[in-house]
Image (cartoon, rainbow, N blue to C red):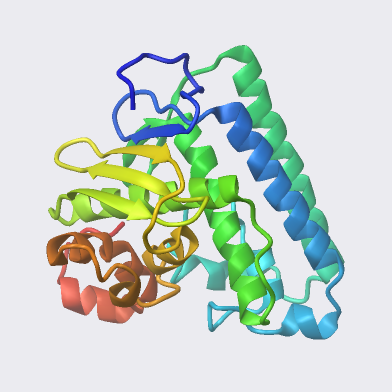
Amino acid sequence: MNDHSPSPGTSQPGTLLLRTAGTCHLDMPHLVEVFGEQRQRFVSILQGFGPGEWAAPTRCADWSAHDVVTLDMTAGFDPRTSPRRWLTASAGESTATTLGRLMAVTSELLACARGRLAGGSRFDVHLPYGPMDWTVLVLHVFWDSWIHERDVLLARGAEHPTSDDATGYAAAYGLFISAAVASLFGDPVRDTLTLGGDSGGIFDLDSRGAVTLTVSREHAAGPPAAEVTDALAGRAPAAAVLGALPGSTRTALSHLADFFTTPVDQSRRSRGPGARTA
């Protein structure tokens, strides 16, 4: 990436900069557009579901498609405990009500993001790994929605009709949040990853201090970006997908997946009292 100082919310073509300290450069207008397209596509697919498809399991073994859509995808939470509380609160809700809420929340979220961009607003939000430029929160919510879309579709043998830009954003955030979680465990990462396909590229990651990810989007050879994103989120075995990486990097980037897939009681026993979680 060239050492320029682009306007807030923009980036040079084919580049992406994420960091836990300072302004990120994500081409926010384009991210908001990609996010809107993803949610519109997901809603259109869900509108065609019958009762059996709504009740069918997803890649998250405990959640049906209806459960996944019921979850509030716009808020941070502990994925092992919070969903159960939300599902209890919304027990018996019709699929039409659930889908209507998803559509309303999506419209509100995108309108808010566009308003912030139009007003040139800059502010920090607090995510589990510290204060962050607000644009990272939008990317986080997009990543969460993209992963859940795959949870629903891939479990029923359907293809995930995502775009290259959407997969590229999801892969970037998957690596970024994995490195941020690794830093909470005192396990810094300094490595360059090459992910394959049109949605891939060169991902330069450094979490020694503030976490920084610089992405150069280009067609490259390497493990498919979507599969790497799945593995980082605990949806696929990390060892198989990240096997070409040095062992220390693979271990560090697996902390987030381990967190997602470790039951709460086991997590507390293994880490001991007072251990930090993501």
In the rendered image, the vertical position of residue 208 relative to residue 256, given as above or below: above
Q: Is residue 43 left or right of residue 227?
A: right
Q: Is residue 25 left or right of residue 263?
A: right
Quarter location, residue 258: bottom left
Between 166 and 71, which is closer to the camera in this rendering?
166
Residue 69 seen in the current view: yes
Residue 88 % position (x, y): 63, 74
Quarter location, residue 202: top left
Q: Residue at x 41, y 51 (%)?
A: 220
Q: Residue at x 77, y 76 (%)?
A: 92
Residue 88 seen in the current view: no
Between 2 and 18, which is closer to the camera in this rendering?
2
Residue 7 % position (x, y): 47, 14
Q: Is residue 45 left or right of residue 273?
A: right
Q: Quadrant of the N terminus?
A: top left
Residue 101 % position (x, y): 77, 54
In the rendered image, the vertical position of residue 22 relative to residue 228, given as above or below: above
Between 152 and 131, which is closer to the camera in this rendering?
152
Q: Quadrant of the C terminus?
A: bottom left
Counting the numbered discs, the total is 0
Q: Residue at x 65, y 72 (%)?
A: 152
Q: Is residue 15 left or right of residue 277?
A: right
Residue 259 % position (x, y): 32, 68
In the rendered image, the vertical position of residue 237 relative to residue 19, given as above or below: below
Q: Residue at x 32, y 55 (%)?
A: 178
Quarter location, residue 63: bottom right
In the rendered image, the vertical position of residue 208 relative to residue 45, given as above or below: above
